[in-house]
Image (cartoon, helix red, strand yellow):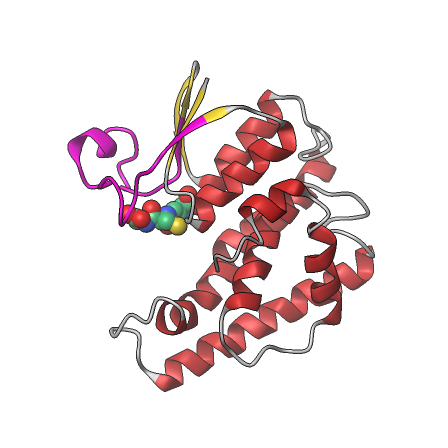
Amino acid sequence: MLRILGKASSINVRKVLWTCAEIGVHYEREDWGSGFASTRTAEFLALNPNGLVPVIEDEAGVLWESNTICRYLAGKHGRDDLLPTAPRERALVERWMDWQATDLNASWRYAFVALVRQDPVFADPAQISASARAWNANMGILERQLAATGGYAVGETFTLADVVLGLSVNRWVMTPIDHADCPTVTAYYERLCERPGFREHGRNGIP
Ligand SMILES: N[C@@H](CCC(=O)N[C@@H](CS)C(=O)NCC(=O)O)C(=O)O
């Protein structure tokens, strides 16, 4: 049985839960992370020295880093549709996953922590606007990509790139900023709702 450590409200844990739903993997999930069991204990740090969720454990051992875990699960279960094995096709999926984890995540952090988490440390209006602007600009990149593919992040079919980007779009929609006009992203957000895994773990009322 796959063990997943991490609270179900964490965007990075939700990537893993949605991936499990797509694959049909059964798991046992434990509530770790802020508000639940502390990830700063020696027990947890022995699993992930970063003290972050998600972490998984299966018969092969322990793994952390959400996008890596999603790739591992798709590979382990032979889901070439979610993560192709051919180098070029695989790189096209991984490119958008890496973009989400680096450029996209970096752009929304200040505005999200200020406006949704309402952390008083993140209260500088100039930095909130700069973050919202950068976030909208990245959504513009996704808008143009989706207009070109006519369907999903990489092409006509759903892949792991859509798991990580779908959750990111949900966060964008749910954060109270002035949203750039992105009709193709909005249509994509609706299209993803055809998937039970997105309804349960993505567009479930949590930003
Ligand atoms: N790069 C990591 C980031 C993980 C991360 O930031 N996790 C957050 C929750 S979304 C966390 O563990 N925060 C500390 C806590 O909740 O105790 C990944 O993608 O797995």
Residue 158 position (above or below residue 144): above
Question: For the image shown, how many numbered marks are present on the structure?
Answer: 0
In terms of depth relative to the viewer, which is nearer, 148 or 174?
Answer: 174
Q: Position of residue 101 (x, y in %)?
A: 49, 52
Q: Position of residue 123 (x, y in %)?
A: 30, 79
In terms of depth relative to the viewer, which is nearer, 103 or 125?
Answer: 125
Question: Over which residues does the magenta segment extend?
Answer: 28-56
Residue lying furthest top in this view?
A: 59
Report which quarter residue 84 is drawn in.
Answer: top right
Residue 94 seen: no
Q: Position of residue 39 (x, y in %)?
A: 24, 40
Q: Position of residue 99 (x, y in %)?
A: 56, 54
Residue visible at 37% across and 39% down in the picture = 6
Residue 29 position (above or below residue 76): below
Q: Is residue 91 left or right of residue 33?
A: right
Asked if the magenta segment contains residue 55, the reply would be yes
Residue lying furthest left in this view?
A: 42
